Amino acid sequence: MFTGIAEWFSDVKAEFILNFITKNRWKLMLTGVQNTLLITLLACLMGIAIGIMVAIVRSTWDKTHETMRPGLKKTVFGFFNALCRAYLTVIRGTPVVLQLMIMYFIILKTWRNDMLVATLAFGINSGAYVAEIFRSGIMSIDNGQFEAGRSLGFNYVQTMVYIITPQAFKNVLPTLANEFISLLKETSVAGYVTVMDLTYAASRIRGATYSPFMPLVGSALIYLLLVMFFTWLVSKLERRLRNSER
């Protein structure tokens, strides 16, 4: 029994050395983690920027289109609302890996910066989901807040920027943090366009050593640790937000 366990540990050690120590292959995994986190962070920031703009257009149209007077202003606003709805439908209705490949092989095929292309693809994808998160947050704000802004002399845009959006942002912050975690896992398909993310690094090691267990399980464990860490941060954020409301 003990001999079998010792042999198993010896095999695991040999696999570990072959996949990570030999030729410093662990550096591929380190580069993969760094690129994964960088793409996730930049794409999340881009998604928030896109999402806020789309959410403001969509929520403003939902709140005001029935009372808005017919004319150029309503026509223009209706056009942008329809554009935002089309964006949400297309992005949320197609797989992110196909969006990434279309961006890389068709739309931005002349670009040579794979990381930037991947960041743009994931940012545009994230923006569609962030937009719906923000829209629900804006729609949840009581209409009395809009009236309070008007009583202070703010127009609709100023009321939205200075009063509504900060409150909505606070309400949806935990959900946004969870979107960041989901985005972290979604970036695992970046290797389809040869971006050296964590999954692609594991695949490179597997192809070099013909030993799939250690690099694939190792990358899965790294993803798990990252998700657990950010989930812990989100839980602390939620507790802090709850305490601040008391």
Image (cartoon, grey):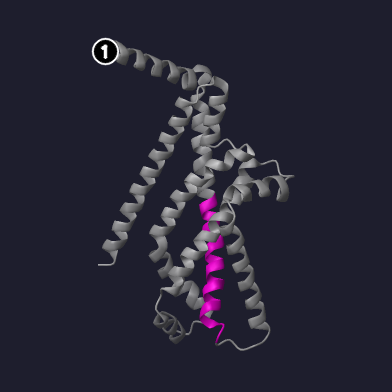
Residue at the image point whose x is 37% and y is 14% from the top = 10
Say which amino acid is labelled 1.
Answer: Phe
Residue at the image point whose x is 41% and y is 83% from the top = 148
In the image, residue 42 lies at what x, y percent?
54, 49
- Quadrant in the picture for the N terminus: top left
Q: Main secondary structure of the magenta part?
A: helix
In the rendered view, would you say 68 is above or below 112? below
Characterize the local packing of mark 1: few (<14), some (14-19) or many (20 or more) Cα atoms within 10 angstroms.
few
Residue placed under numbered mark 1 in the picture: 2
Query: What span is in magenta?
Result: 43-66
In the image, residue 14 lies at what x, y percent?
43, 15
In the image, residue 7 lies at what x, y percent?
35, 13
In the rendered view, would you say 123 is above or below 216? below
Label 1 element class: helix
- Tell which of 18 and 146 is nearer to you: 18
In the image, residue 228 lies at what x, y percent?
36, 43
